[in-house]
Image: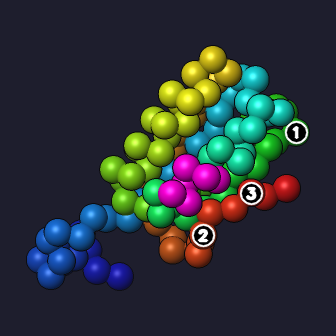
């Protein structure tokens, strides 16, 4: 794997892919959160998945460039602002393991 400096030397204008793992807490289940999330992600060309957790939270793992992922999270927070009480966001390098964005059950 190339270092960030090597990548920028050969491809200076390509955004670096990232992965974000997000937990949304609040009244986030039973309100269309997963389906809206999937629609927004697919429209933005983001890959990954979303699922409901038994503890009432919603979990997302998504990959794209950091700017798109930040906008994606921002759109979700805005759309569901009355329902989200807390958001836990963790960033890491992309693994390239997803082909599209789906809902996991």
Range shown magenta: 38-43
Asked whether residue 39 is drawn in magenta, I would say yes
Provide residue 28's location: percent of width, then percent of height: 73, 30
Q: Quadrant of the N terminus?
A: bottom left
Provide residue 31's location: percent of width, then percent of height: 77, 32
Q: Which residue is mark 1?
A: 54
Provide residue 69's location: percent of width, then percent of height: 44, 50
C-alpha span from label 2 to label 3? 10 Å
Q: Is residue 4 left or right of residue 68?
A: left
Q: Earlier in the sequence, mark 2 or mark 1?
A: 1
C-alpha span from label 3 to label 1? 15 Å
C-alpha span from label 2 to label 1? 24 Å
Find residue 17 and report its image quarter: bottom left
Q: Main secondary structure of the magenta part?
A: helix
Q: Which residue is mark 3?
A: 103
Mark 2 and 1 residues: CB-CB less than 8 Å, in contact?
Answer: no
Residue at 69% x, 51% y is 50
Residue at 62% x, 46% y is 37
Q: Which residue is mark 2?
A: 100
**Of labels 2 and 1, the one closer to you:** 2
Residue at 26% x, 74% y is 3
Q: Quadrant of the C terminus?
A: bottom right
């Amino acid at each position: 794997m190339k270092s960030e400096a090597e990548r920028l030397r050969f491809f200076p204008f390509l955004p670096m892919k990232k992965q974000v793992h997000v937990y949304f807490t609040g009244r986030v289940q039973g309100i269309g959160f997963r389906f809206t999330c999937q629609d927004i992600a697919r429209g933005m060309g983001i890959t990954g998945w979303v699922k409901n957790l038994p503890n009432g939270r919603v979990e997302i793992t998504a990959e794209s460039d950091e700017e798109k992922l930040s906008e994606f999270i921002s759109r979700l927070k805005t759309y569901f602002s009355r329902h989200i009480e807390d958001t836990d966001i963790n960033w890491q390098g992309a693994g390239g393991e997803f082909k599209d964005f789906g809902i996991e059950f």
